[in-house]
Amino acid sequence: MEKFTVHKGLVAPMDRDNVDTDAIIPKQFLKSIKRSGFGPNLFDEWRYLDHGEPGQDPATRKLNPDFVLNQARYQGASILIARSNFGCGSSREHAPWALEQYGFRALIAPSFADIFFNNCFKNGVLPIVLPEAQVARLFDEVAAFPGYQLSVDLERQVVLKPDGSELPFEVQAFRKFCLLNGFDDIGLTLRHADKIKAYEAERIATKPWLNNRLIG
C-alpha cells in the first residue's frame, strides 16, 4: 500500500448527500475476481450515458458531459469533497479500490459510513471528517476558483488551504501509523516475517507429523 504523508492535489466536488457504494462502483463490476481495474468504472452510472459492464473499453463509451468528474476543470483531481454519509450502503471493499485506482488519495466530508470509512484506511485512502460548515465553505471555494488545490498533512493532521489557513482533523493513532508507513493488513503481518518463519521451522522440527498431515 502506498504511504500517505503529505499530499497536495486538485479538488473535485461531489455535491450529493448519502452517496452509496453502489453509486461509487455498481454491483455488476463486483463480478471481477481481480483487485485492480476499477478506476474507469468509478461512479459508472453517473459518469457514462450508456450501461457499463465488466471488460468494456472505456474509450468506446459515451461520457455524461454534466457529471463533475468529466468536466475539464476537474481532470486529474486527487482529493474529493463530499456531503454527509458518504459511502453508505453495502460494505463492498471495491468502493475504496475504485476511488484509489481513479486517483483519489483523500476524501473530505462531514461524515462517512462506518464500514466504508474503515475500508478506506485499509486501502491507502485517507477519509477526513470536518465540520459541515467547513465542508460547505470548501464547496463554495472550489466552485469559485478553478484549479483549487488543498494540501493534506497526515503527520500534523491538518488540511492546508490556498490562503494558508489550516483545518485540523482527527485520526485514530493506529490508522495514522498504518497510512504513514504504507501498511495494509498483510503488510502489518509481514513485519513479523522472521518470527513466522522461525515458528514454522520449529514446528516442523518438533512436530513433523503435523507438516506431513498438511501436505497430504
Image (cartoon, helix red, strand yellow):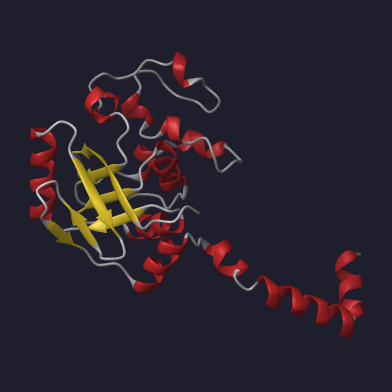
Residue 174 horizontal side relative to residue 143, left or right: right
146 or 50, nearer to the observer: 146
Who's the residue at 20% across and 51% down the image? Answer: 84
The residue at 49%/33% (across/down) is 28
Please say if 113 is above or below 97.
Answer: below
Q: How many numbered dots are placed on residues in this image?
A: 0
- Residue 182 in view (yes/no): yes
Q: Where does the image place residue 131, in percent across and percent down from the top left?
A: 13, 59
113 displayed left or right of 56:
left
One can see residue 112 in this view: no
Q: Residue at x 14, y 46 (%)?
A: 162
Would you identify the image quadrant in which residue 5 lies?
bottom left
The image shows residue 44 at horizontal and vertical percentages of 38, 30
| Position of residue 17 measured from the top left corner of the image (x, y, whole percent) | 20, 45
The residue that appears at 76% across and 78% down in the rendered structure is: 198
The answer to whether residue 66 is above or below residue 189 is above
Say which of 185 and 181 sits in front: 181
Left or right, 188 with respect to 158, comes to: right
Viewer-proximal residue, 176 or 58?
176
Q: Quadrant of the C terminus?
A: bottom right
Furthest residue in direction bottom, as rendered: 206
Note whether 202 is above or below 192 in the view shown.
below
Task: State the image coordinates of residue 99 (x, y, percent, origin top left).
Answer: 39, 42
Q: Quadrant of residue 31?
A: top right
